[in-house]
Amino acid sequence: AEGDKWERLTNSTAQERYPVWSPAGMWLAYTSNVSGRDEIYVQQYPGAHSPILVSTAGGRAPIWSPNGRELFYPEPVSGTGAVTSATRFRVMSVSMVDPARPGRPQQLFEAAYAVLPLDSCASAGCYSMSPDGQSFFTLQLRPRDVPRVTSLRLILNWFDDVRRLAPAN
């Protein structure tokens, strides 16, 4: 629409995904593969500031704590390849009291892809935190019981039935 102004926030040819603003709106956390694997970065806003690496062993889909003092993200337990149903993640916590100098990531717990299905949510995270900062909420992929097809009914000349049941008047 007229009057809208677009502003590029990063300056990289890397794939950058899972953007999330800090609660105060002064920092942007996101995933970038600029190093060759997915890592978590933060960048101050507004202004053209350099990104600051937060993760130490890979990561994706960061979220901020409601008070903005911590950043959470899943880190793959092993390997940097494609995510599969067998992939496991460590959910990491990083002190962001001073986002310009992130703390060292600390493991909170380990989870399976079935609990944190990151690739199923495109460029947004599949989990969030409760307003009090004490609980995580996540999507969970549940197995579907698809009924087995035992018969197939083929209807020929079905337009004749449509015309008979719903005449064009």
Image: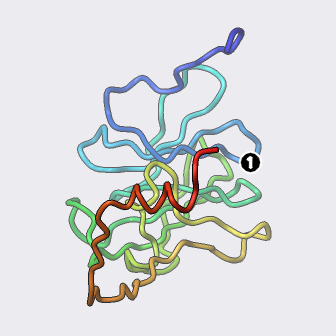
Residue 149 picture location, percent across and down = 28, 85
Q: How is the image coloured?
A: rainbow
Q: Residue furthest top?
A: 2
Instruction: Tell me where residue 41 appears, x and y as whole percent.
Output: 47, 44
Q: How many marks?
A: 1
Q: In what element is the residue under mark 1?
A: loop
Q: Position of residue 128 (x, y in %)?
A: 62, 65
Left or right position of 69 against 107:
right
Residue at x-position 71% and y-position 9%? 3
Placement of 56 over or under 91, stated as above or below: above
Res 33 quadrant in image: top left
Q: Is residue 61 above or below residue 140?
A: above
Q: Quadrant of residue 166?
A: bottom right
**Nearer the observer, 168 or 30:** 168
Q: Name the amino acid, label 1.
A: Pro
Q: Which residue is mark 1?
A: 23
In the image, residue 150 lies at what x, y percent?
A: 26, 90
Where 30 sits versus 148, above or below? above
Which quarter of the rendering shows the C terminus? top right
Residue sitting at x 31%, y 69%: 155
Q: Give the left or right position of residue 50, taking residue 15 as reference.
A: right
Query: Which quadrant holds residue 131?
Result: bottom right
Q: Residues within 10 Å of mark 1 (few under 14, many from 20)?
A: some
Quarter of the rendering occupied by the N terminus: top right
Residue, x 61% and y 32% (percent of image)?
44
Q: Relative to the observer, which residue lies in front, 126 or 42?
A: 126
